[in-house]
Image: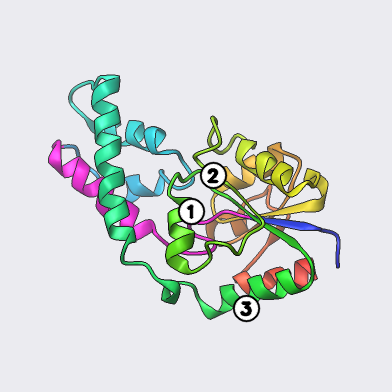
Amino acid sequence: MGKYQGVIFDLDGVICFTDKYHYQAWKQVADDIGVYFDEQINNRLRGVSRMESLDIILEKSSRAYTAEEKEELARRKNDLYRSLLSNMSPADLTQEVRQTLEALRAAGLALAIGSSSKNTRYILERLGLKDFFDAVSDGTNIQRSKPDPQVFTMAAEFLGLPASQCLVVEDAEAGIRAASAGGFDSAGLGEASAFALTTYPMKRFGDLQAICL
């Protein structure tokens, strides 16, 4: 085994891709209340909690919303999103991701999820990964979203490992900032691969094997 004993993965954009479902659900909510919403605004929501995402969307609103109204809008969005997630299956997990995860597990690395989503466990179940990871830290056990490091520090705690022995895998700048703030090295995919704070820029998920093994 190499430098790391554990790997902590963000979920959406790393293990799987549910961006289209988030977009469709938020778009429906925004359309229902007459607020402009497009893919550019949607890009600002990556790695951000549900309520913080709603606040970003409501920047375009002509009226203010009460806390109760916001809770109802967030609930409506999540209901729409979960209904769309029901379309997911193990077929949504690419062969590259599956083989890489299995190689890391076979090498003895502890594997965890660190995601701000409250739907993490449901998504893992849909992907056929319900019991695959050693620990799951998600929106149900944190109070502060990325770029705060809490979701990753709790994942490392669940694994029983210090941050120095864990690698965080992310696709968003907010996630890389969170990893850095928590004292973790990071591997970045997508936009995170070009971010200055990323320890290991990656072109593909399979690059993890060269980093970790």
> What residue is disc 2 on?
138
Kind of residue at disc 3? Gln
Where 24 sits versus 98, above or below? above
> What residue is disc 1 on?
121
Q: Quadrant of the C terminus?
A: bottom right
Q: Quadrant of the N terminus?
A: bottom right
Q: Is residue 23 magenta?
A: yes
> What residue is disc 3 on?
99
Query: Which labelled disc corresponds to residue 170?
Result: none
Mark 1 vs 2: CB contact within 8 A: yes
The image shows residue 131 at horizontal and vertical percentages of 58, 62
The image shows residue 164 at horizontal and vertical percentages of 82, 47
Q: Is residue 81 magenta?
A: no
Dividing the picture into quarters, in which one does residue 180 lie? top right
**Residue range of the region highlighted in magenta in the rendering:** 9-34
Q: Residue at point 78% right, 46% down?
A: 160
Mark-to-mark CA distance, 3 and 2: 24 Å
Q: Residue at point 76% right, 72% down?
A: 210
The image shows residue 128 at horizontal and vertical percentages of 49, 69
Please name whichever residue, 35 or 94, is drawn nearer the observer in this view of the structure.
94
Picture colour scheme: rainbow
Mark 3 vs 2: CB contact within 8 A: no
Mark-to-mark CA distance, 1 and 2: 9 Å
Badge 3 marks a residue whose secondary structure is helix
Badge 1 marks a residue whose secondary structure is helix
The image shows residue 212 at horizontal and vertical percentages of 78, 66
Q: Earlier in the sequence, mark 1 or mark 2?
A: 1
Kind of residue at disc 1? Arg
Dividing the picture into quarters, in which one does residue 61 lie? top left
Mark-to-mark CA distance, 3 and 1: 21 Å
Kind of residue at disc 2? Asp
On screen, residue 135 versus residue 146, left or right, reads right
